[in-house]
Image: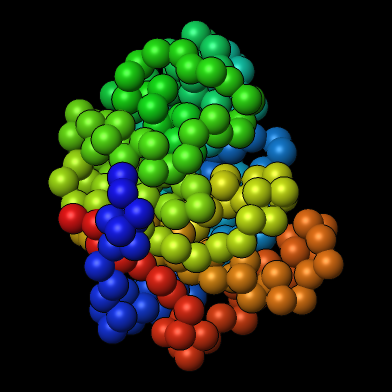
Amino acid sequence: MEEDKLRGKAEPSGWPAKAWSLLSATRSESPLIQCITNFVSMDLMANTLLSAGASPAMIHSADEIPDFTPHARALCINVGTLSADWLPAMKLAAQFACQSGKPWVLDPVAAGASSFRLKACLELVELKPTVIRGNASEVIALSNATLGTSKGVDSSHESTDAVEAAKSLAQASGAIVAVSGAVDIVTDGERVVGAHNGVPMMQRITATGCSVTALIAAFVAVDPLHALEATVSALSIFGVAGEMGMNLAKGPASLRMHLIDSLYGLDDAVVHSRVSITSFS
């Protein structure tokens, strides 16, 4: 994508107001978000949801899913520490979410790193997630249904390398597809929107990607009919919190703390002055 297209078309009044309304709704409604996630991310993911006003529940036992999942406002599935023991519970929860008419969000961590992981992620995509959020390499692997050059959970591609793969995946799956990177790309298969917030040091904190996926689930929970807008707003809001936190941080460890505090303290003025979202098409 050419540099001028990457800048996109700014919509200075609409996007910040939408992002603020979604954050405000999350704070006032405190939606219950069920998270089936990896061991590395549980703490930061739960604290991200709490600081945004949502209510996290780290429920992953298949024995609890029939009773619990239908009462959650949204479901977040993250395959980071995937095992054969956990996969049936992930599928069962996705099925109950769909049957209950609740949105669910998939984070296909390192989807192209192994045949087991790729097959599991493709099977989860068949269960109709509302949103798929991954890095460029993960989205390309899912879109092509092939193993890729692996750096583990890190991407070998820029987000802008995956625009066409994201559009193709969105069209094939019916999901909103978000690609994290220096510019976060979000598409429904036709529209392409970018969030330009965040700081590079966020990549030095484990589970920031996992945590923004959970925040997407919370925003989609309060506005399920506008999943694209909720997704790009969550990415931007999380990025703004990172920018604010970076003003106080000395390194990754302190940024982690200040990121959570900044998300908790975001106000109308900061959101309206800092949210940077553009439309590419």
| 67 to the left or right of 279 | right
Q: Residue furthest top?
A: 115
Residue drawn 22% across the image and 46% down it: 188
Can you see residue 169?
yes
Q: Find residue 195 and report its horizontal and vertical position in percent.
A: 40, 61
Q: Position of residue 63 (x, y in %)?
A: 54, 29
Task: Please tell me which residue is depicted at 47% across the width and 30% down the height of the picture.
Answer: 137
> Is 72 above or below relative to 262?
above
Say whether residue 158 is left or right of residue 13.
Answer: right
144 vs 59: above or below = above
Q: Is residue 272 above or below residue 56?
A: below
**Residue 46: x percent and y percent?**
63, 55
Nearer to me, 156 or 252: 156
Quadrant of the image containing the N terminus: top left
Res 217 visible: no
In the rendered image, which quarter contains the C terminus? bottom left
Instruction: Please tell me which residue is depicted at 33% across the width and 19% down the height of the picture.
Output: 144
**Count of numbered tags:** 0
Q: Position of residue 18 (x, y in %)?
A: 31, 75
Q: Residue at x 47, y 47 (%)?
A: 180
